Amino acid sequence: MKLLMPFLLLFSAFVWGCSNSSHNSSQPITISVVEMSPNSFTANGEIVGTDVDLIKAAMDGAGIDVKIEMEDVWTDGYDKTLNGPNHALLGIGYSAERQDLFKWAGPTSRSGYYIFSKVATGLGSALGLDGAQALDSIAVVTGWLETTSLEDLGFTNLVYYDSYEEAVTALIDDDVDAIASDGKQLAYRLQAEYSFVDDIDVCFSYKSVYYYMAFSKDVDDSIVAAVQTSIDELSKNKQTLAILQKYFPAANETQLPDVLQLFTEVAPPFNYYTGSIIDPDIQGSSVEIVAEIQSRNDYASHVNITGWVDGYNTVQYLPNSALFTTARTPDREDLFQWVGPIATLNASFYTLTASGITITTLEQAKALDSVATPRNWYMHEYLIANGFDNIVATSFSPIDAFNQLIDGEVQALFMFDEGIDWLHEVTETPTEDVTKQFEESYREGYIAFSLNTPEETVQKWQQNLDDMKADGAFETIWDKWYAGSAMP
């Protein structure tokens, strides 16, 4: 978020007029918004913002008359949309708990949820889950997804406010230790008073969020579908990016949602990035395979880098989304739709050479004091399924788990073989310092699509992959990364 501040400049209003079509009716749809800069706010008597400008253009393209109202309290707009009739709420985070309460069109924007504190408090950054839960007080807005997500994580140190401005004021006045907020929203709000580089710490990052427009259930399906089509077309022809760049002139497509939300995480050599997380250069064997699959479609969506747990949880509920590279296991089989295989995943036990530990069987591995592996990865699930009670799965990434071994915090590491060389390189650990004991698990990596992604989309991706394997394109990519290794 520190790098967002240069983008936060003044804006110009978006000119909009309604068109006529078969979707027009005598009664326009009333859309509720709240002050949530830069997504929605009032300037010179007009309601504007990144989401507002986008939805005006989308409704215009769909030929639907609308009336936009600014609500004093977010829950008022939520209740009006829940009860109807002919109502909508813009800028609502999509979640599994809400998905059956409304009809949906979007996403209109994307961001991330974080817990922020002022540097002057001395609380520090990167506190992790336990550290964030140990804070004395965190300002939140009642009913917002930022808040309910923390409630679901078991936070009991939340201080509730009726509006975002009240929550921000509590942070500024030191009435609370921290605030839970959309990162882009807080950066925009504080730009006149604070520098994100010097004055604000990110204590904890906990969720990717996608904002939608929620319609009351009485709104006709054809209207919702027309709005969705219009939003998708705005993404495809780059008008969504142009709208964002009015408010963030240096913004790029990685800060936007897309027609299909594609997630990957840092797990070289399959997927990783170089450069800034704000504008990452995403690379890897799976990334190249996905790019080739998409090159055979009419449109290619961009790939988003996130943490494994966030991506894995998000794709279980978010429409039109996918995560790669995902091990296909029996426990996961019914959670996703699958395209693949695109990778081989060989997992082995590793120890420090200096420890003198030798492991040749699974039972010997179980007898160790501790075995590290990344939380919620297929390797973690494998250890649980095989009765390990010495698992240390407190890390969220391969590099953190690897460092637990290097630092002597654990006796062994259960890790996928394909990533070991990269882990040695990035941590500057000599290869002779770590010994591979034995290979225990083999899986294949897939692209996991959400269950509410259209079947025809999934089938098209699988057909493209099958065609790649038949015409040699897959083999060309595979040999670039894994020459001499059997293809999946």
Image (spheres, rainbow, N blue to C red):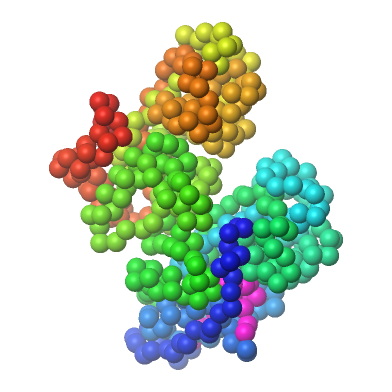
Task: Name which residue lies at 38% across and 70% down.
Answer: 238
Position of the C terminus by quadrant: top left
Task: Name which residue lies at 51% across and 48% down.
Answer: 306
Confirm whether the magenta stretch covers residue 379.
no
Q: Looking at the picture, how far across and down is residue 433, in whole percent? A: 53, 17
To which quarter of the image does residue 457 belong? bottom left
Residue that sits furthest to the left in the current view: 471
> Which of these two is toward me, 66 or 4?
4
The answer to whether residue 463 of the structure is visible from this angle is yes
Q: Looking at the picture, how far across and down is residue 15, in whole percent? A: 47, 87
Q: Looking at the picture, how far across and down is residue 389, in whole percent? A: 61, 20
Q: Looking at the picture, how far across and down is residue 420, in whole percent? A: 45, 27
> Which of these two is toward me, 354 or 264?
354
To which quarter of the image does residue 273 belong? top left
Q: Which residues are magenta?
A: 28-43
Q: Is residue 361 left or right of residue 120?
A: left
Q: In the image, is residue 166 above or below residue 154?
A: below
Q: In the image, is residue 113 above or below residue 272?
A: below
Position of the N terminus by quadrant: bottom right
> Which of these two is toward me, 418 or 180?
418
Count every numbered label the image shows and give the total: 0
